Image (tube, coloured by chain):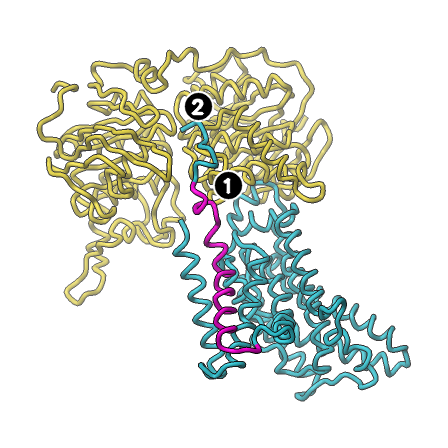
Amino acid sequence: MSTPPDAAAVPWTRRIPWQTLTPLLGLFVLVVIGAMLSDSFLSASNVTNVLTRSAFIGIIAVGTTFVIIAGGIDLSVGSMAAFVAGSMILGMNWMLGLGLAEGVVLALGIVLAVVLGLAAGSFNGFTITRGKIEPFIVTLGALGIFRSLVTYLADGGTISLDFAMRGLIRPLFYGSFLGVPWPLWIFGAVAVIGSIVLHRTRFGRYVFAIGSNEDVARYSAIPVRRIKTLTYIIQGLCVAIAVIIYVPRLGSASGSTGVLWELEAIAAVIIGGTALKGGSGHVWGTIVGAVLLSTIGNVLNLTDVISNYLNQAVQGVIIILAVLLQRGRGR
Amino acid sequence: MDATTPDPKPLLACRELRKSFGPIEVLHGVDLDLRSGEVHAIIGENGAGKSTLMKCLSGYEAPSGGEILLDGRPTRFAGSGPAESAGVVLIHQELALVDDLDAAANIFLGREPTTRFGLLDRRRMDREARALLDQLETRVDLHVPVRQLAVSQRQMIEIAKAVARDARVLFMDEPTDVLTGTETEVLFALIRRLREAGVAIAYVSHKLDEIERIADRVTVLRDGNHVATKAVTDTDAPEMARLMVGRELTDLYPDKRPAPDAPERLRVRNLTVPGYAEGVSFELRAGEVLGFAGLVGAGRTETFEGLLGLRPARGEVFVNGAPVRIRRHEDAHRHGLAYLTEDRKGKGLIQSMPLTPNLTLQALRRFARPLIDRRAERAALREAIETYDIRTGRVEARATELSGGNQQKLVVAKILLDEPRIVILDEPTRGIDVGTKREMYFLIRDLAASGLAVVVISSELQEVIGLAHRVVVMRSGRVTGILEEHELTEHEIVQYATGLKNRGVEPHEHAA
């Protein structure tokens, strides 16, 4: 028992982490089905379209991965996105009114979105850790607060970006670099940076430790409250980044912007193999989860086998299946 | 009764029992007979397979080979439920009560008596629970959640729960680990009554003196093999220890080095931990081993958790002569203090994680530049396995796969990895076998010799006397005496621990 068995003695089928590959296999199956049902599914324009659409939820869900692995939950991200988007548009309109140059306004608008995202995340994080309140409750409250703030700012209607800005800001969503749309570059950058921070830094390791066993983390001299707070701040930052590519797409925000995004983000994380109770997971699974979710909608749109109205039902089935499969593959 | 020939009719027995976890076999064909009206001790080092054997025999684990005989007939328990229905009950080592339920609800969990309307018969539950706990001389409020009770009371409830199941075969895994001397006596009286009633009792313990007192026969396991089964009257503690480790065990404690005349590392003045300790003052030198003795519940653990920022406390702390403020555990860590928790399963290791991240968790700063150097982490694990003789099947194992003693070595390696200057070891040898204990004692001596300041909190008086240069004795949250090396006898410590003697260091007069 004291001599470790040679790694080569373990059959290779056992060394492949099947349960972590489940989401990827699921996506593969879905792509095969999509390609069989529709000729246009694998066309470059459709693939780009699906990936670009998954960028919003995907970027938000990278932040959600941190929150959930640390044992928390954030229900407020959809409302937070609407609030940040509404404030960003109002801010830019106001600055235009002051006569600032459009380029400066855009830059300041982006700064404003990031600051608001960080502030909103800090509000959640500090309320949870300093106030010692369940994250479910704090972020449920925040969900209501942000949602009604944006409705108030919009006076019950829609906040629209001044037309003078539209031309300048459009490329942030519709433009591309080296043939790849900007949202995908940003999505990719967020995923890579998120992955490195989560898996290769001290902070990331602490996130796992806290989600696995908070007592052990505390007894190991880990600043538990600071790390937990930071996960919500990262979530806020991710929301801000998603908003920065969302605003150029529609140029407006209202009380119905981002409704249920929090559940889509959580779904992407869970499909990606992260445990809802915390302590285990990875960023790339979340990316696959986000892409998988938007692929479902796309396949239903392109084909008429299942009504598009059943989109959320199919997503629901996939979420449950994903968790079942991952558990079934477990030890 | 001859110990070597198999009893014709054991209540529960196993033949050639094997158990593998994955590719690793941990029981290599073990035979055991449990007879009616007999206490059968099972001993062995950590990782010898005692717990696995018990779990196989009580339905918690399915054996991978061999057979289990109940009343002479081959049996397969489909789980612990069927085993309990057959009268085979295991009392857990890790307390397995439902924290939010009260004592009576826990005792009857899963087999609650009901009235004829199908509602819970609370009155009957209370009556019977009270009767059972009275037998164990455990007076607890039947209507408070068990999370509010002391560990020893919870252990007694665990025992009552097993007895309430009308067990014919009872497995006890280190039942006295968390009990005081008096409570142990009460438990022994109950065990004797059960034995007279014809129950077969399997008793796992590291305490050889207890086995000599309570057991009829003893079976020794080593590395998953059956080594010997003997009548207790035919053997003695030294022989049992020898059979367990497979070699002659020389002195358990290393020679003490003279008390150092070294600079003071830590001074604590009037430390108060609300609800647990008051006005605790002491100092600690480099190279010194300072013992903390006292009864269970004297507030020793809480004192140090307060000192180390793990619970609210106030008082003055000086590290290397300079006053420091420790408000969070990170502050203590920064000042070079490290704490080995007494609860290694719940607070020491992340059971679900592999060994490497567990080892480096506290000293992670050393491996981040700024990205974590995984190769250096793996090298650190290899070195720790070598240095502390951690026995693991494979290096990628999760912490939960290690036996108790090896988990303890891993936690020790973890807290020493960041090179602290002051270490506080809380019950460093609880639940580990005599061989590993000896290694721990030598390690503690070496740590002190290398200039670390060491505090050892222990409920085993022999251990404190064998290791410490001076001993602080606590009772009910207060220091009743600080004994110098020449005063260290069990008798003397007990007098201070029970309050017969008191050098009562009143809070303020000591503040010189």
Provide the residue designation for mark 1: B354
Looking at the image, can residue A21 be seen?
yes
Depth check: give the residue in front, A16 or A238: A16
Q: Is residue A269 above or below residue B167?
A: below
Q: Residue at x 18, y 37 (%)?
A: B68
Q: Position of residue A1 (x, y in %)?
A: 40, 29
The chain that hosts pointer 1 is: B
Locate residue B163 relative to residue B204 in the image: left or right. Answer: left
Q: Main secondary structure of the magenta part?
A: helix
- Neighbor class of circle 2 (other Cα within 10 Å; few <14, some 14-19, many 20+) is some
Q: Which chain is yellow?
A: B
Q: Are marks 1 and 2 in contact (CB under 8 Å)?
A: no
Depth check: give the residue in front, B386 or A83: B386
Q: Position of residue B361 (x, y in %)?
A: 59, 40
The numbered dot on residue B436 is: 2
Q: Position of residue B271 (x, y in %)?
A: 60, 35
Residues in magenta, as a range: A11-40
Q: Position of residue B139 (x, y in %)?
A: 30, 43
Locate residue B484 relative to residue B191 in the image: left or right. Answer: right
Q: Which chain is cyan?
A: A
The type of residue carrying mark 1 is Pro
Quadrant containing the N terminus of chain B is: top left
As drawn, which residue projects farthest toward the left? Answer: B8
